[in-house]
Image (cartoon, rainbow, N blue to C red):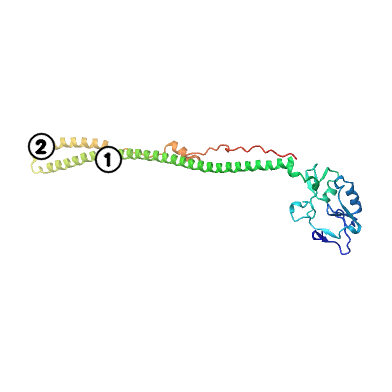
Amino acid sequence: MASSLTLGSTDDTMFCHLCTNVRASAYCLDCQIYLCPSCESQHKKFPTFKDHRLLTDNKMPSFYPTCHGTDDLNKCSDHPQEEIRFFCASHDSIYCCICNTTKHSSCQQKYIPDICKDFIESGEYKDLTAFFQNTAKTSINCLQDIENCIKKVDHLSSSQVEKLRKFKALIIAYLDQREKELLHEIHLTRDQDLAALQKLQTSADTIKSDLNKALANLKSHEDNANNLFIASKRAHALLNQLTSSLEDITSKTKYREYDLEKDPMLEVLLKNAAGMAQLYMSPGKRTYLCPKANILSK
């Protein structure tokens, strides 16, 4: 027994575990605690402790017990130096001798060594293990659900990116087609206006040439008054004709002015924050519904 006990005071005076600085009069072998006369009297009154073995006087060990086990599982949460010995059905709690006296003296107490013998065969333990097994299955299903959701999230992202790129390609194709149409219209307008102006230019060049020839012909007859008079009359008629032609060319010398402007609908689209497309979110979608937990009754 000495291997599981700690040395007491130097004068072998042992003190009560439950009281402060009160000399012990007995030692409970089952609870492994020292008791003063008052605590010893109370200890004997509890039906739970009726079969406990008490050592008194010089039969008491002169060593304090250490922690009554090497496993933290058996240690009291409120008194780590004490071993769990009791169960309170009223509070569904487990505790040590000190808690038994200070917190649960009026409770329905049970001594754990007495009630644990057949616990492994009890319905409570069987329900507990079944609950663990069911919960383990639920956790597997939950993990599978998470994995499925991860796959669906990745697939959804990929499909929407592909859809977005198709939108972009459609818009680019439309813009490319519209660009071709506008370029054709611009070039056609240019070609038509150039052709008309070039035709007028040719006519104007011809008139200029005819005027130069008529003037030269008129000058050539200046040494003969008779011929000069006849040439002048003919030149006058030709000059009237060429002047009329020049007036006609002048009235037709023009081109069409044009300016490229954005379509109002495009302006609205460019100012729209959503722009080309927009994501519409829906509530989260689940692929697996976790069954309602079957909480064990206490």
Identify the element where label 1 is drawn. helix
Q: Position of residue 194 (x, y in %)?
A: 27, 40
Distance (Cα) linking label 1 and label 2:
41 Å
Q: Nearer the viewer, residue 245 or 292?
A: 292
Determine the image quadrant of residue 8. bottom right
Give the total of numbered labels. 2
Q: Which mark is residue 104?
A: none
Q: Quadrant of residue 135?
A: top right
Tell which of 90 and 27 is nearer to you.
Answer: 27
The crowd level at tag 1 (other Cα within 10 Å; few <14, some 14-19, many 20+) is few
User: Mark 2 is on which residue type?
Assistant: Ile
Q: Would you place residue 144 above or below residue 18 in this image? A: above
Quadrant location of residue 60? bottom right
Residue depicted at x 88% and y 49%? 43
Residues 192 and 207: in front is 192
Query: What secondary structure is marked by label 2?
Result: helix
First in sequence, mark 1 or 2: give its number. Answer: 1
Residue position for label 2? 230
Mark 1 vs mark 2, foreground winner is 1
Q: Which residue is mark 1?
A: 194
Report the quarter where the N terminus lies: bottom right
